[in-house]
Amino acid sequence: MKSAVRLLVYFAATLVLGALLAPVLYWGAQWLVQHGLFAGFAKFDFESFFHRALLIAAVVLLWPLIRSLHLRSLCDLRLEANSHWSRDLLCGFILSALPLLCCGGVLLALHVFSLRFALTGYGLARIVGATVAVPLVEELFFRGLILGTLLRTDRIYLSIVITSAFYSILHFLKAPEQTSTVVSWTSGFASIANSFSQFGNPLLLGASFVTLFLIGWILADARLRTRSLWLPIGLHGGWIFGNGLFNKFAHRGTTALPWLGQNLLVGLVPVGLACFTWWVVLAWLKYARSRQA
């Protein structure tokens, strides 16, 4: 229980520090633009700096959190060395990306999405970069640190629910653009309040929040079954790569919530696809273990 309280304190401190840091980052960027330096900063609104400030705050406060939790090894987080890490990483990637792209192909054939070609070398590099960086950071943080810390309470399912809900909430929260037209010391706190505005839309809540919660649960289950982060990293990377690549070849102008949003990771159809993917992963894990026996 003490570990859970320390996590709550860490989250609250991250929000407060991020809210205080965001105006400083924004004013600093505007000063650089006014002096002819880094003119590209001018195209970013306050919310962009607010999100970066939260990341900086999370990193700055991470070391004190680890010290307070008395973490000394992977065993403290119920993780073990995985001799089959490359197999889990590759298979996780394939088993998540392939069904997603196949589903996208079916939706294109049914004219649910319209075909386009917007893939460039820079666009592909961004997709690859996100495929590598995002799963590493998020799995280390959510399924590694957060879930590992909660598992020390020996309440497995409650730990998964809390981790998956937090994972979903952080991804779901996004302040509307240009919420802070006049930036002051309180603008960061206003952004936090505005981030909860999306919870007033029940269709968006059901389509986006539930999908992200299920994905978080699947990734947590993969971590528990393998006692390793490599399979969830692979699954996470496959979803990011498949969705990013599909979005470069397909476009959807309207949404049909709660069934389907503007991409393959929002809506109840993606929920069904995620369930199918996890069924395939479970079958593969059973086969892989039978080969090891």
Image (spheres, rainbow, N blue to C red):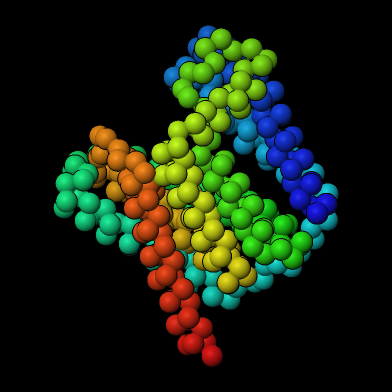
The number of numbered badges drawn on the structure is 0
| Residue 94, position as x, y percentages in the image | 38, 65
Quadrant of res 229:
bottom right
* Left or right for 282, reference 111: right
Residue drawn where x is 44% and y is 19% of the image: 43
User: Between 261 and 203, which is closer to the camera in this rendering?
Assistant: 203
Q: Say whether residue 125 is visible.
A: no
Residue drawn where x is 56% and y is 31% of the image: 196
* Left or right for 130, reference 113: right
User: Between 243 and 110, which is closer to the camera in this rendering?
Assistant: 110
| Residue 286, position as x, y percentages in the image | 48, 81
* Left or right for 92, reference 105: right
Residue drawn where x is 54% and y is 20% of the image: 46
Relative to 247, say whether 287 is above or below. below
Relative to 253, say whether 212 is above or below. below
Relative to 255, say whether 135 is above or below. below
Q: Say whether residue 163 is visible.
A: yes
- Outermost residue, bottom direction? 293
Classify the position of the C terminus by image quarter. bottom right
| Residue 114, position as x, y percentages in the image | 19, 42
Quadrant of res 40:
top left
| Residue 17, position as x, y percentages in the image | 71, 29
User: Between 245 and 274, which is closer to the camera in this rendering?
Assistant: 274
Residue drawn where x is 41% and y is 44% of the image: 207
Classify the position of the N terminus by image quarter. bottom right
* Left or right for 259, reference 225: left
Quadrant of res 203:
top left
